[in-house]
Amino acid sequence: MSVLSPPKQAAPPQTPAAPTPMTPEMQSLLEQLKDIHEPAPIGWWPLAPGWWILAGLFIVLLFAAGWLFFRLREKRRRNLYRAEGVRLLKALDLGTPRVIEEINLLLKRVAVATFGRDTCGPLTGQHWIRFLESTTEEPMPESARRVLLESLYSSTSASRGDLEVLREFAIVWTRKHQPFAEDTAKSAPQTNPVEAKHV
């Protein structure tokens, strides 16, 4: 036979405790409390160190870009004579009589623009050819050398192939010639009036 336990009685509902009456000290402490204030928003000034570094890099890059632009523009302006020389050489008709003289004249004009009239103006013959070869890494082909030495001021005419070789050398020289270094300029080939014969 089972023994039945008496049913559990529900706990009586708890009533909230009555508020404690405020003492004068508690009242004065409450009066000292102030409302919560949000912090002021962070301003953009003064800038953080990272922004100063970024601004400095930007200014340096701006000056570097300006310097590079002016440097390239100056180099292009200084080399305009090269482009003009190449254009004039390509425009020559190799079928016209005495085209050798025109090629030689264009080479002289480009050389005078770079090295000055005193350095290369009086050069002729072998001295002129040595000067052309000393100012570029491209050697003059033998056929171009022969045309300058044998046909420039003589009545013999050069073949079309030799003229094309000479013009091609003149174009390459106009594009790639390099000014002398200071010490090399003093030892540039010179001629005296006796040697300055027609080529």
Image: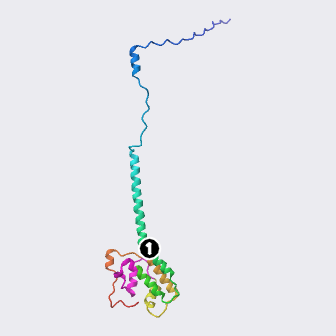
**Residue denoted by label 1:** 80
Quarter occupied by residue 179: bottom left
Q: Looking at the image, which is closer to me, 44 or 57? A: 44
- Percent position (x, y) of residue 194? 33, 91
Image: magenta residue range: 111-140
92 shown above or below 49 = below
- Percent position (x, y) of residue 117? 36, 81
Q: Looking at the image, which is closer to me, 92 or 5? A: 92
Q: Which amino acid does the dot numbered 1 rest on?
A: Leu
33 shown above or below 149 = above
Residue 42 is covered by the magenta coloring: no
Quarter of the image that includes the C terminus = bottom left
Q: Is residue 113 visible?
A: yes
65 shown above or below 142 = above
Q: Residue furthest bottom?
A: 155
Snapshot colouring: rainbow
23 shown above or below 135 = above
- Percent position (x, y) of residue 20? 45, 12
Q: Which residue is at a point 42% across and 71% down the rendered structure image? A: 77
Quarter occupied by residue 174: bottom left
| Badge 1 density bin: few <14, some 14–19, many ≥20, Cα 10 Å | few
Q: Which residue is at a point 41% across and 69% down the rendered structure image? A: 75
Overall secondary structure of the magenta stretch?
A: helix
Q: Is residue 134 visible?
A: no
Q: Which residue is at a point 51% across and 81% down the rendered structure image? A: 91
Residue 131 is covered by the magenta coloring: yes
Quarter of the image that includes the N terminus = top right
Q: Looking at the image, which is closer to me, 72 or 45? A: 45
Q: Helix or strand or loop: what does disc 1 sit on?
A: helix
- Percent position (x, y) of residue 83? 46, 75
